[in-house]
Amino acid sequence: MTETHLTLAEVESLARAAHAGQTDKAGRPYTEHLAAVAAGVRARGGDAEQIAAAWLHDSVEDDALSEEWLAAAALTARTKAIVRAVTKCAGEEAEAYARRILATPGALLVKEADLAHNADPERLAVLDESTCGRLTEKYARMRALLGLEQTPRRSGTDS
């Protein structure tokens, strides 16, 4: 018996509905971040399971969807594992979080795309200086823990 899984379009629609009305630190619709991370995963050669996880990467952490929903969802085990790996737990040490990401096949690419969008200079530029500095430091530390090169510069050819 073959298990049926949600299509990428269905996952995107579900993620957009779950995060409807939420905004990021700059006041932009949160779904813009989800779309950018999904596009970043695709641009980095990610597969459909990783792209689905990118759409859902903040859903449990932000309480947009529950862990119970994720457990029962018509998603592959790998997609669920990636979502769980990139879901930061309250009070969790950055080192433990990074270890879990590195130990989960496919999760590093999703987190790399997430960090790249979070650290985008255009996104950070609209924040106050204190918040911008704090977040820049936080993202750089996570990139270092994950063994990623420091924040890449935008070349103008990537989107």
Image (tube, helix red, strand yellow):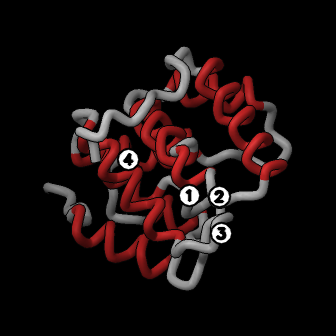
Numbered disc 3: secondary structure: loop
* Residue located 52% across and 52% down the image: 122
Numbered disc 2: secondary structure: loop
CA separation in Å, label 2 and label 1:
5 Å
Type of amino acid at the residue the image marks with label 3: Asp
**Number of the front mark, 4 or 3:** 3
Name the spot of residue 155 as percent of width and height, x first: 32, 33
- Quarter of the image with the N terminus is bottom left
Name the quadrant containing residue 153. top left
Instruction: Give the mark, 2 or 4, whose residue is nearer the N terminus.
Output: 2
Type of amino acid at the residue the image marks with label 2: Glu
Q: Is residue 97 above or below residue 132?
A: above
Number of other residues with Cα within 10 Å of mark 3, as a class: few under 14, some 14 to 19, many 20 or more:
few
- Residue at the disc numbered 3: 63
* Residue located 52% across and 75% down the image: 29
For the residues labelled 2 and 3, say whether their Cβ atoms are less than 8 Å apart: yes
Instruction: Give the mark, 4 or 1, whose residue is nearer the N terminus.
Output: 1
- Residue at the disc numbered 2: 61
* Residue 23 tag number: none
CA separation in Å, label 2 and label 3:
6 Å
Name the spot of residue 104 as percent of width and height, x first: 48, 29
For the residues labelled 2 and 1, say whether their Cβ atoms are less than 8 Å apart: yes
Name the spot of residue 40 as percent of width and height, x first: 34, 44
Instruction: Give the mark, 4 or 3, whose residue is nearer the N terminus.
Output: 3
Q: Is residue 50 left or right of residue 63?
A: left
- Residue at the disc numbered 1: 58
- Residue at the disc numbered 4: 79
For the residues labelled 2 and 4, say whether their Cβ atoms are less than 8 Å apart: no
CA separation in Å, label 4 and label 1:
13 Å
CA separation in Å, label 1 and label 3:
8 Å
For the residues labelled 4 and 1, say whether their Cβ atoms are less than 8 Å apart: no
Type of amino acid at the residue the image marks with label 4: Thr
